[in-house]
Amino acid sequence: MDLQNEKCVMVIDETLPTGLIANTAGIMGITLGKEMPDTVGPDVTDKTGCSHRGIIQFPVPILKADGAKIRELRKRPEYAELTVVDFSDTAQSCKTYDEFIDKAAATEEDTFSYLGIAICGPKKAVNKLTGNLPLLR
């Protein structure tokens, strides 16, 4: 993987409360770490000898959009070369993973409300999809 030419962004529904925005980013970040382990750098040691776990080796801007735009992004056909992680109200409402499995299996995709989506891959492709979205502040 050419880390110099990779980009990852998270697009989160700007209307969510702060706690849910943080939860959405955290959950998508954990899944991205699983899906893209080569992007996480080695552990580092500080001057005092304390070890710190490796983190992703490039920035991950958090962008904002409304739910309709996130849904539009989720349905784009360009995803063949990208890693995409979504987080929905269906997932967020479940207390256990088994409950999520069952609920997702019984829910039509077009009724999911997406709280956020993470998109990672070649910079050019990610920029084409998300380059016009503002930062979440």
Image (cartoon, rainbow, N blue to C red):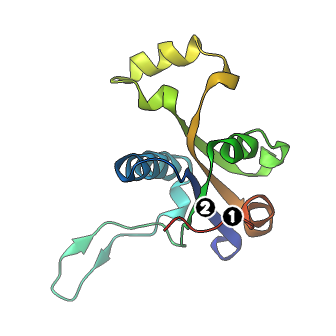
Q: Quadrant of the N terminus?
A: bottom right
Which residue sits at x=45%, y=21%? 100
Which residue sits at x=79%, y=61%? 125
Which residue sits at x=69%, y=42%? 68
Q: Residue 18 at x, y = what percent?
A: 38, 53
Nearer-N-terminus badge (1/2): 2
Q: Which residue is mark 1?
A: 133
Toward which corner of the image does residue 50 lie, by quadrant?
bottom left
Query: What is the crowding at mark 2: few (fewer than 14 residues within 10 Å), some, or many (at least 20)?
Result: many
Circle 1: residue type: Leu
Residue 85 appears left or right of 96: right
Residue 82 appears left or right of 137: right
Q: Which tag is nearer the camera, tag 1 or tag 2?
A: 1
Q: Which residue is mark 2?
A: 9
Q: Residue 127 at x, y = what percent?
A: 75, 66
Q: Is residue 101 above or below residue 121?
A: above
Circle 2: residue type: Val
Q: Residue 40 at x, y = what percent?
A: 47, 63
Q: Secondary structure at mark 1?
A: loop
Marks 1/2: CA–CA distance: 10 Å
In front: 102, or 63? Answer: 63
